Amino acid sequence: MAGLTRSSLPPPRKALLRCITDAKGKEVLDRGLVLWFPAPHSFTGEDSVEFHIHGGTAVITAVLQALGSVPGMRPAEAGEFTRRAFQAGKLGLTEVEGLGDLIHAETEAQRRQALRQMSGDLGRLYQNWSHKLKRCLAHVEAFIDFSEDELIEDGVLNQVDTSVCHLQAEMERHLKDERKGERLRSGVQVVIAGATNAGKSSLLNTLCQRPAAIVSPMAGTTRDIVETALDIGGFPVLLSDTAGLRDSPDVVEREGVRRARERVEQADLTLVVVDCAHLLTDAQQAVDVLQTHLMCVLSSQEQPETDRCLLVLNKSDLLPECERQKLDREMRRVSGLPPVCLISCHTNDGLQDFLTVLHSSVKTLCGDPLSGAPTLTQARHRAHLQQCVAALAQYKRHRDTDLALAAEGVRLALTSLGRITGRVAAEEILDIIFKDFCIGK
Amino acid sequence: MAASMKSCSLVNTFRGCEQSASHMLTKKRPLPWSVLSLLSRRAAHLARQQYDVIVVGGGHAGTEAAAAAARVGAETLLVTQKIQTIGALSCNPSLGGVGKGQLVKEVDALDGLCGRAGDWAGIHFTILNRKKGPAVWGPRAQLDRQRYREFIQSELLSTPRLTVLEGSVEELLVTEPNPEEPGHHRVTGIRLANRSQPITASSVVLTTGTFLSGALFMGQTMSPGGRFGDAPSSAGLSHTLRERLGLRTGRLRTGTPPRIVKDSVDLCQAELHLPDTHPTPFSFLNKHTRCKPEEQLPCHLTTTTPGVERVVKESLHLNCHIQQDTKGPRYCPSIESRVLRFPGRSHQVWLEPEGLTSDLLYPQGLSMTMPPDMQLRLIREIPALRRAEIHTPGYGVQYDFVCPTQLSPALQVKNTQGLFLAGQINGTTGYEEAAAQGLWAGVNAAHWALSLPPVALSRTESYIGVLIDDLVCRGVTEPYRMFTSRAEFRTSLRPDNADLRLTLKGSEEVGCVSSLRYREAVRVRDSLQDALAALHALTLSTNKWRNKLPGLQMSENKNTLVTAGELLQYNHVSFEMLASVFPESLSPYAEFSQRLKIEAVYKPYCDMQKKEIERIQREENMSLPQDLDYFSLPVSLSQEVREILDRVRPSTLGSATRLQGITPAAVVNLLRYVHATNAGLKGRTHTNQPERKEERDEERCARNASLPQ
């Protein structure tokens, strides 16, 4: 608690207003009431602290993550508080009447929710990991329990090494990718990029409904990054306008372009703005032009992710009506491109459609906060996955010196993952052992 | 000897009876055979009509049970068909191994027999898994059959309060179920085949091994029995268990390989495997084994050929045993099932010595049940055995076991007070598994008879606990064998620390440990604590450590302070190295150097497990009454949960949480029930199974009234 509030513990059972920060004490997450209940005068009879924080998903997620990063801290299991209170003799019979039902309802909901989540791609991914880990563990266990008496094929452990490495890398990537909670906390990084004079700053001004950036018909007006915070359909968005991308002899502009590329690299979502006048009316050529343009803008990203960008064709007001409609129709037909929106920052034509597309993209990036619990579970998932990755590191650390401790690492990893996908019993491991090996003794 | 037995039996409490000499391996010599048989007959004459505990069976479970019951302080009778076969190794001539070695260490820590017997009889000692970490080290020894038997027999016959009687049990005596307590029987004793008078006892431990409706198979012939050369046990016992007590039974099968004449084997064709140059004793009390390092015998390894597979397939129609669908073990299968399950592969065959002077070899991995002529054909397909002669053919056994979910964690039959089961009768396989159960059943049988509360071992503190918890909670579908992977807390339950885990508890709570062993365990514990404290008090900067221990690889900054305890966690740092730097403070603990090294390396991981262990132990301290009617329990439980609970009848909340299909909510509701029940029975000291306690008081009164004291 002291670590998360940048100050000493408050007096017992006294509510104090404190800043709640991340575990490193750097970033303030919220201001709220904190309480300390030293044992045995608490609900469970153990040392407890309470954080009273604001109800927003972003705040809750951030605080949960901060708590999760404190060593030894983990989310409570269903009914665990009550169980502990019971074990400490804190709860009498009457006080507990009905609590079981309450928890039952709670776990039922959690079960249903878990099932819902588990049926998707994510569920399949976790199940797949769990399955691979089970095999790894079974093979290590087979090696421990049987290799002295039996022919266990050479290289069983080498296979496990490879699998563990792969799994660890995959999980780390997954953890890095799934930054939805963090996005909710700090806002989705949306970057406007494109060639000079495409109307990027106009788009920024249109979106924030004020002249935040200077606009002029001159190419290269914007030199530095212009940032503004927006609320897109309830999601926090940090919108950045960047310098138009072109080779310039001007030192200041070159720096601006460098910054623009850097920002694109870090972006959660890039809005690639194109002057639609540059597009020829031949649909195929238009696609080619757009693709080249995209590659040019996104080239700074390690792996150009076209699914993390929107194409904004600006200045539709400058096209004749029939051309505009034709382009609009064709752009809806083509495949292989990110979503395309034809708009005019000048007349606000097409802006509503664009906002809808933008909203859905941002929503995908943040996850759906409307059902409050999934973010909570995701914080739980994240904690378990982090434990899982750490446990796999234990396997690697002890692989050559103490196989029992290495196996313990895989077992811990499986237990952590099992808290997401369901438990794994020792018997299952033995089943795999006997299926995969010819064990005689 | 007879005189000393008599005088010992006059001593009332075990704790007061010093057994110091009998525990020391080097000071003890087995009795000559003639004296043994004389003694046993005398014992038969001495047999009384009434005992605290009767143990039926003289195998690994029975001998440990009888010795443990007597150690706890109960007047104990061991009944066996042949005194001569007490302590016989019916199958492989070896003890211990991966997982099994842990059980031997734990039985020894509780002052059981098999560890010391192994040290006495061992002729080839190895620590398996030596390179895989101390938590999974598997101490193992090849044994001299005769020496093992001698040790066990002389140990039993010199145990105070223990009488050994030769006889065949005709009937198990139980009371009619008490109408007030539906289904509750009570055991009252046994009736022997050649005696009209029953022998009464408060507790009976059945360790009948493969003899319960046992049938021997070889080729197409089948004969009743549990072991070749022994009479089948009476049908009466089976009848009582199944018909009168209504116990559910299942059928399992196992087998043993042919014994091969050593001189007929060409050992040059097999791979030589030498024992450890320094034999490590099983027992915490022994510093060395009886067998000198250089006297040890080697083992040999060879493999099967395609010809073996051919003979198996050709003889299938002549092989009754293998055609039966009875469940056999996956991990000690006959050569027939190995070949059929994994065709086209070669399988390992270990050629193990049977004893220092034995003319036989034991071919581990060649258990078979085909007709003897085919057995000979089969073994001769193996190059090293091309001219081998069979001394005794292999055979299969099928036998009944009692589904162990009908037992409490004390290994007592839930519906019959005072009846305990241990060993293969519970569906396990292996000497070590049997010994572990036997010891624990014996301890609890004595506790029951002496009106002491039942004792339980948790799976968080011992492999014995894992074994019993698995049996009584999950039951068995095939012969159960111990593996290290069955123990969730393997890093804490190591062979090296079994004494710390169990000896103190065994003395203070269970009462089955001699004062000599207890004092030794206390000394070890205190020394280890002192040594660890000393290690953590010695602090130097990284730089200074490097100066004192050249070649030390440390990544830390040169001014970081590191304790000797932390340094010991490094792979290449040994206690001896540290002791050379600080001879004054560390050299007194040199005898514990290996244990200290292990403690240092494992401490962080054990600390991590400690919380989880504590949680489980708290839950295990909350017991659920055995006669609970889950269907009418006035708490909120789903029908599905009620059915599971009714079927398994977990004895503690802890085991309930481990059942599949039990929700957290159900656990909370059960907790509420336990809480209420325990509150209602305030003031009773033994909260473990409160109802039973009450019942037992009345029952004891009744019993005492009916018997002349």
Image (cartoon, rainbow, N blue to C red):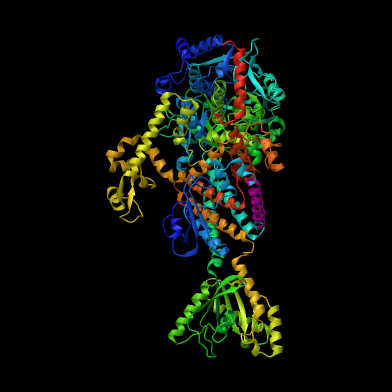
Q: Nearer the viewer, residue B260 or B154?
A: B154
Q: Main secondary structure of the magenta part?
A: helix
Res B172 → quadrant: top right
Q: Looking at the image, which is closer to me, A368 or B364?
A: A368
Percent coordinates x, y for residue B109 in the rendering: 47, 30
- Counting from the top left corner in percent of width and height, residue B533 is at 35, 41
Side of B11 where B578 appears, left or right: left
**Depth order, front residue of A271/B665:** B665
Q: Quadrant of the C terminus of chain B?
A: top right
Q: Farthest residue in the front direction?
A: A14
| Quarter of the image where one finds residue B655 | top right
Residue at (35, 53) in percent of width and height: B554
The image position of residue B98, as x and y in percent, is 51, 37
Residue B496 placement, left or right of A348: left
Residue A109 painted magenta: yes
First to last magenta residue range: A99-116
Q: Is residue B405 left or right of residue B621?
A: right
A22 drawn magenta: no
Q: How many marks?
A: 0
Side (left or right) of A182 relative to B7? right
Asked if residue B501 can be seen in this view, the reply is yes
Q: Work out which quarter of the rendered image holds the N terminus of chain B and state it.
A: top left
Q: Position of residue A177 (x, y in %)?
A: 55, 64
